[in-house]
Amino acid sequence: MPTSLVCNSLDILFPVITRIVNISLSTSYFPSDWKKAILKPLLKKVGADSAEYTNLRLVSNLQFISKVNERAVFDQLYVHMTISLMKQVMKQQTDLEGSKRIFDFLSQMALPVAVFISDRHRSIVKWIRECRKDTSHYYDIWHVAKSITKKLLKASKEKGCEVIRYWIPGIKKHLYWCATSTKAGFEALILAKWMSFLRHVANKHSDHPNALYKECNHGQLARRKWIKIGTNLTRYEFFSYYIYSGLYDKKS
Ligand SMILES: [Zn+2]
């Protein structure tokens, strides 16, 4: 397809080409036709004898879509490999410096950063909030789970709070479920689901106070080491505090 025709029809062709390339990448399928080229012998020097093979240079023309696909793979691999390499090289630098360099690199590649996921470094949170207003920043759920586990393990070492340790695997599972079962943009629902765990550990699975999530989603449960509200106040308070502070990093 002539380049001028492609450029003039780009608004129509662009979504179609994007879809073809995305399907090729997501299915790991590269059509064999895309590997076939049209070979054209061109004379190396004007006026040379065209019957003599050594005077000819072969020019191969691949299909346009084949080259676009190759370029897309190269660009994505280049960005991925460079960022991975940068992360390794920048281990001695602060996380904020590293993040800034990654943003600069992507900016040079003309790639806007719509979403940035990091661990819970206050400096990164502040910098993105103030200097990268077009970027949505989320915490990596693995880091949130790690932080909550650490806090609950510490709490479980307090006298009378040993039962908290029993609930740690369940609460990690619940954290992942809250995040993955809720569509983006419904943060209030995530919070409602998350806080329901405070009633769940007390064997209360319905009539939750938050109207967004009134009832637990699970079915019949086997016996658990339930924490009774009131009678085991210290344990419950610890649990309540760490569940809440685990989700909201007050330092950030
Ligand atoms: Zn429940």
Image (cartoon, rainbow, N blue to C red):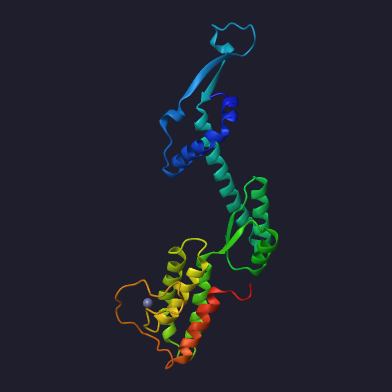
Q: Quadrant of ligand 1?
A: bottom left
Q: Nearer the viewer, residue 133 or 44?
A: 133
Is residue 134 positioned above or below 189 on the image? above
> What x and y, as percent, mark residue 1?
53, 24
Q: Kindly indicate the quadrant of the structure image that contains residue 31.
A: top left
Q: Residue furthest front?
A: 211
> What x and y, as percent, mark residue 128?
66, 61
Q: Nearer the viewer, residue 8 or 244?
A: 8
Q: Is residue 94 visible?
A: no
Is residue 107 positioned above or below 54 on the image? below
The residue depicted at 42 percent of the width and 81 percent of the height is 199
Q: Nearer the viewer, residue 117 or 184?
A: 184
The residue depicted at 53 percent of the width and 76 percent of the height is 246
The residue depicted at 48 percent of the width and 83 percent of the height is 239
The residue depicted at 49 percent of the width and 87 percent of the height is 237
> What x and y, as percent, mark residue 117?
57, 60
> What x and y, as percent, mark residue 96?
67, 62
Q: Is residue 200 visible?
A: yes
Is residue 23 positioned above or below 2 on the image? below
Q: How many marks?
A: 0
Quadrant where the C terminus sits is bottom right
